Amino acid sequence: MRLARLARLCYRRRRLTVAAWVLGTIVVLVTGFGFAAEPLNDFSGGDSGSAKAERLLDDHFPERSGDSITLAVRADAGVRAPDVQAKVRQALDRMGRTPHVTSVASPYGQPGQISQDGRTAFATANLDVTSEDMPTDAVTELLDDVRSSSGPVRLELGGSAVDAAETPGGGPAEGIGVLAAVVILLVAFGSVLAMGLPIVTALLGIGSGLGLIALLGHLLPAPSFSPIVAALIGLGVGIDYALFIVTRYREELHGGSDPEEATVTAITTAGRAVLFAGTTVVIAMMGLFVMQQKLFNGVAVAAGLAVLMTMLGAVTLLPALLGFTGRAIDRFRVPGLGRARRPLAERWARTVQRHPVVAGLCAAAVLLVLAAPALSMRLSLPDSSTQPHDTSGYASAKILSEGFGAGTAAPLVIVTRGGDAAPVAAAVRATPGVAAVQPPRASRDGAVSVVMAFPTTGSQDERTPRLVHELRDRVIPAATAGTGVRAYVGGPNAASIDFADSVSERLPWLIAVVVGLSLLLLVALVRSVTVAVQAALMNLLSIAAAYGVLTAVVQWGWAGRALGFPTDMPVTTWVPLMMFPILFGLSMDYEVFLVSRIREVHRTGVETREAVAQGLTHTARVITAAAAIMVMVFLSVLLGADVAVKQIGLGLGVAIVVDATIVRLVLVPSLMELFGEANWWMPRALARLLPSGVEHGDAVHVEPVSGR
């Protein structure tokens, strides 16, 4: 078979294979990061009202086409005091000399920028670039020069460019995840050499993947968080895939096979399962194309490419490395580690099989309880008010909120064209929930006007989306009826709301596509409709549980501070959207490895009950180790500063814990016990259409498990 030939080729030409991987990865990394594409962070919601408003601003207000930086001023003696004004004007002059700043609106020359009590003020610096394109070092220098909390006045800077500089993505998370994986693999294998193989394979796979992702951005631009997400997924699955293959290789060696045959058997069994599992993850990620947004297309391809490279490394690079280790894979043992504990897994399997109904109902009840908070999930994008409390961005938002109201830091930008904007401004000003409205400002060509409206509530408040929909659905249509004026509600606040609405609308389609395609793939693998449907339902339950825990921690604040979330906040809009395909694909990984082993044993003539016990006994330890690695990799991002990345790390980590314990160790054996031989039901017509599954690989050695 082809996979066996590939394994033998890589094993026998191991020097060439390893050299090709090492040199290829170096070339791809150097080229990729040397010519990396700029990220795309367009959360405008496609053809939404905010997107139309943004296009009008770009065409008629080019000086306001970028983001802005806000200077928040607080002085107990009053911002009009001479010494305070001197400090503020000095800061404004420094802001004006910052690269990409096109204009600065002083609080002393613009109405509405000084609070009623005279102790708070703000100034706005317009940029000609987005916050992603704003040089971080320029923002950092501006922060160092302007920020002050002593003397007669307190000065703080806010805005998305400031947030990006103060809380950059990335950090030490991936390194900490690798260290955790080293410890877990060492405990699982008890051998330094065996531990090193999955780490090396995963690092080369993810390294080449990240380099290709950087280059691919020229064709499919992706958001700035995509390399972090791709690295997390690639690192987790890369180590796991190699772990499954190395575990099977060691089993074959201990069963009497020579190193080459052990390698071939490991690749044609565990390696084939890796290919199916990895393909499921890639297909699940491609489901993001259903969202019909370039931003998610880039994320889908980036994450899929990372998984593809780690999968390729597992079935080509790893056989070559096994050729170098041979029978010495268990050398450099650590005393007391790596000893098998199969009797415990076997006893657990027998216990679940004796009480399948009770075990299944208890597991389902736990998952439903965990999932319950997800019913109240709200979506929004982080802003300065959700940043760590020691940042200037948060301090700026707090000053503005106390002096002017919570909505000052998140204004609505209403863009009108085709007539007089004054009636629109008057109607918006009279709307409940609007704190203040600035007079309309016309563009140089007079074709477009801008009205700035400040809500009484902040961007994270659930009342703000209701206000935006009220303005769009009732207030503005009534004010423009019969006038020929067209008005669009835009700005970052409205764009975040439009993006959340788009996600809510298309998420059911994403779920349907991912579940449907994954079902077909799993049916082809295990040759069973029953098992595939069981897997899909259980995966949906585990994902719902992860959504519920994420909502309780982030939105409700349960243990949120302990986990590094500075305040209660809605779930970041793109997080549940990204979590679903990732988790559905990763959950299928464990299903594939467990059920394919059960199927493998069953095909030798063993009844289903015994095959389930043997399959769980043989895979429980390695699935537990694999899950522990993924959990540590995902949760390591909690040590970073980016709240959105921390949310997805928490959600992924919780889901893997739930999936590897409640689902794989309780629900799977209990349901398979209840269904018995019906687990393998497959319509003949469908069987003729589908390709052969993993069980049609080379013959494998199955160790007997002692009686019940």
Image: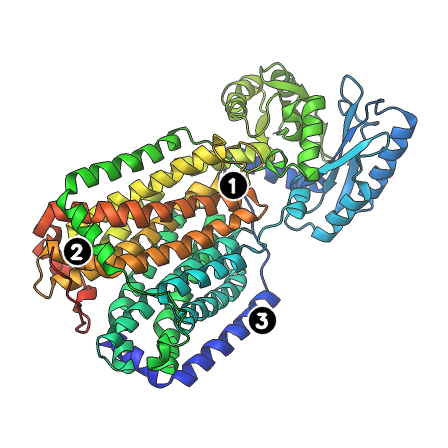
Q: Tell me if mark 3 has few (under 14), some (14-19) or many (20+) residues whose alpha carbon lies within 10 angstroms of its own.
A: few
Q: Horizontally, is 37 left or right of 253 in the view?
A: right
Q: Nearer the viewer, residue 190 or 434?
A: 190
First reached walking from the N terminus: tag 1 or tag 2:
1
Where residue 287 sits in the image (x, y, percent)?
Answer: 36, 50
For residue 99, above or below residue 320? above
Q: Amino acid at mark 3?
A: Val
Which residue occupies the extreme right position in the image?
Answer: 82
Q: Residue at x 68, y 43 (%)?
A: 162
The image's mark for residue 563 is 1
For residue 105, above or below residue 653? above
Q: Amino acid at mark 1?
A: Leu
Q: CA distance from mark 2 to mark 3?
A: 49 Å
First reached walking from the N terminus: tag 2 or tag 3:
3
Secondary structure at badge 1 equals loop
- The residue indicated by pointer 3 is 30
Q: CA distance from mark 1 to mark 2?
A: 37 Å
- The residue indicated by pointer 2 is 613
Q: Is residue 294 visible?
A: no
Secondary structure at badge 3 equals helix
Residue 308 quadrant: bottom left
Tag 1–tag 2 contact (CB < 8 Å): no
Task: Give the foreground label among 3 and 1.
Answer: 1
Q: CA distance from mark 3 to mark 1?
A: 36 Å
Where residue 67 sits in the image (x, y, percent)?
Answer: 67, 41
Q: Horizontally, is 278 left or right of 70 in the view?
A: left
Where residue 554 sits in the image (x, y, percent)?
Answer: 49, 35
The image's mark for residue 506 is none
Q: Tell me if mark 1 has few (under 14), some (14-19) or many (20+) residues whose alpha carbon lies within 10 angstroms of its own.
A: some
Where residue 116 sits in the image (x, y, percent)?
Answer: 76, 17
How many discs appear?
A: 3
First reached walking from the N terminus: tag 3 or tag 1:
3
